[in-house]
Image (cartoon, rainbow, N blue to C red):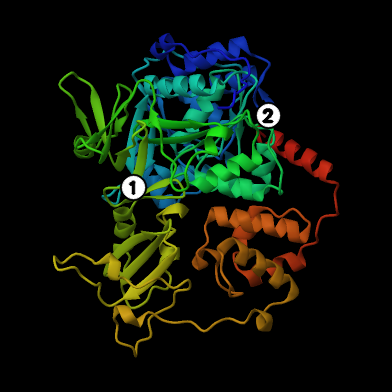
Amino acid sequence: MSTLVVPEHREFRAGWLAESIPARFLAAARTHPERPALDGLTYAELARRAGRVAAAVRGARRVALLLDHGAQTIAAILGTLGAGAAYVPLDPRYPPVRLRRMAALADADVVLTSPGHLALAGELLEGCRVVDVTALAGESSGWVPVDPDSAAYILFTSGSTGEPKGVVQTHRGVLFQVAAHTNNLRIGPADRVSVLSSFSFDMAVTDTFSALLNGACVVPVDVRTAGLSELAMAAREITIYHSTPTVFRYLVDALADGERLPRMRAIVLGGEAVVGADLERFRRHFGDSCLFVNGYGATEISFAVQNHLTRADAALVPAGVVPIGRPLPGTRVTLEPAGPEGQIVIRSPYLAGYWCAPAADAVRFGTDPDGTRFYLTGDLGRLLPDGQIAYLGRLDRQVKIRGHRVELGEVEAALSVLPTVSKATVVARDEHLHAYVIAESAAGLRDALSDVLPEYMLPTSFTALSAFPLTPTGKVDTTALPTHQPITTALPTHQPATQASIPTHQPVTQASILTGLEEVIAAAWRAALDLPQVPRDQNFFDTGGHSLLMAKVQLHLETALGRRLPLTTLYTHPTVAALARHLSQEPAPSPTDPADRMTRRRQARRDRTTPP
């Protein structure tokens, strides 16, 4: 086994679990006032900015955060916690309908936002006070003593009833995760810790506080807007990297052949199954002193099980799905009913709970006779001979889509209320959702769903049927549903409306319809979508695309065109023809030395951490 070299660090003491998150942050800020908390923002400056937020929300119980990924959100989180309130992150990219539901379910007192989202913030919850964080100034500070067992946040996950489900965690529960992350990875002031996940997910919670409570630097990157080239640039300076396996694969595949990231000393993956090919990527691009961590957990506990591998260990792991490892200290994991395979059950005093949902709480949580709480994950596991646990999938209809937890029932419920849909069923295949509806046409369903569901919950395909195939017990026979077509149109009315009447499509001849610039764009689409051809007027997202694949298109086009191409441009012009028209009318920037481009992007990142 390789010997891992780690920088100087400080053990996260068990006694600190009796404190609060803001108390531990202020201690770090006093110890490291001039160290960068984020690029362009020191610990002292972040503490002052958070103090102004705390003063603005003091007296509130729950504070909604309608802010973009970055320094403003981090200051708002710290300030909200410092005022003794719980924060409720609302991703501005979610549909307004979903944001209003989440704000109402949380019963927020205040919405913290920025100028670009003021109008939306005012529509979220009637009577809720709206505060523009960029307008806060002065030296005021609203820090108050905080009970470690008080609520720190409410994060909303997909719910089987059709409504988002709130998970509430305490300061003590967050600090338990920070302690495990700190001590397992030896995080210290010299580290730069990535925060790639939206703050609506627990992954960002662990990453942010594992950095800020240890004097390290937080490196927030929103792949959805920055793209893979920006992530690859940031990764060259990151020491602790954490993402879903999907994002990790896109990052590594964007690197040049033989390129290594020598500063990276820990790669932590979670949210999806890790496979042998991921370990091969790790061995190709990272050094002997880098640690590979395959983690398993849930929003209700965050990490509970981990498998730590060096490059030497990775070479010995058989092909296939990589085991998730062994329980972390402070958690006990069993398989129930007892045996070689069973449901994964987690016991810990640091479990979260559901917000105002006693029925859901009673189904998933329980208490042993000795007072220990347990959580029924709904995941199936197998105990391996060496004591490790292998993840085998879900027991219910919950699925993981690019690391996001999705209840198929919530997507079905959103489809079923649309006026043109009589019934709906949704299945997951190859990490994609496919919707089947009883309706005259599937046209327009994706646009209608995008008004109420976030992007990761939108099906890749929509197929209209006149009836669903049924099992002998009267349930939808999902195995008999037709394989989806990559492009969906209305059912021809002259055909019998059966499962066999799925429309076929004439092949598109690229050479006959594409201009030179369109061919360059189409080639990027084909590479990202793994399709032999793409229509010039088909929306990218209706052809099986999603945000991470759009980032891959961006990377291909930047290389092919030799110019910077913001992701927002691709989202605004989501067809081959539309993007070609836009780019042909927009003058390309003058060629710039790669070193100058890197300097400019670093400056842009610093600018994003500074308020107007």
All told, the count of numbered labels is 2
Q: Nearer the viewer, mark 1 or mark 2?
A: 1
Q: Which mark is residue 39?
A: 2
Instruction: Residue 525 in the image: state x and y as whole percent.
Output: 61, 65
Badge 1 is on which residue?
A: 393
Q: Residue at x 52, y 39 (%)?
A: 243
Quadrant housing residue 188: top right
Which class describes the residues within 10 Å of circle 1: few (<14), some (14-19), or many (20+)?
some
Quadrant housing residue 357: top left
Residue at the bottom extreme, as displayed: 494
Quadrant housing residue 380: top left
Of mark 1 and mark 2, the one earlier in the sequence is 2
Q: What amino acid is labelled 2 in the image? A: Asp
Describe the element under mark 2 as helix, strand or loop. loop
Q: CA distance from mark 1 to mark 2?
A: 39 Å
Q: What amino acid is labelled 1 in the image? A: Gly
Where 72 falls versus 245 (above or below)?
A: above
Q: Is residue 131 visible?
A: no
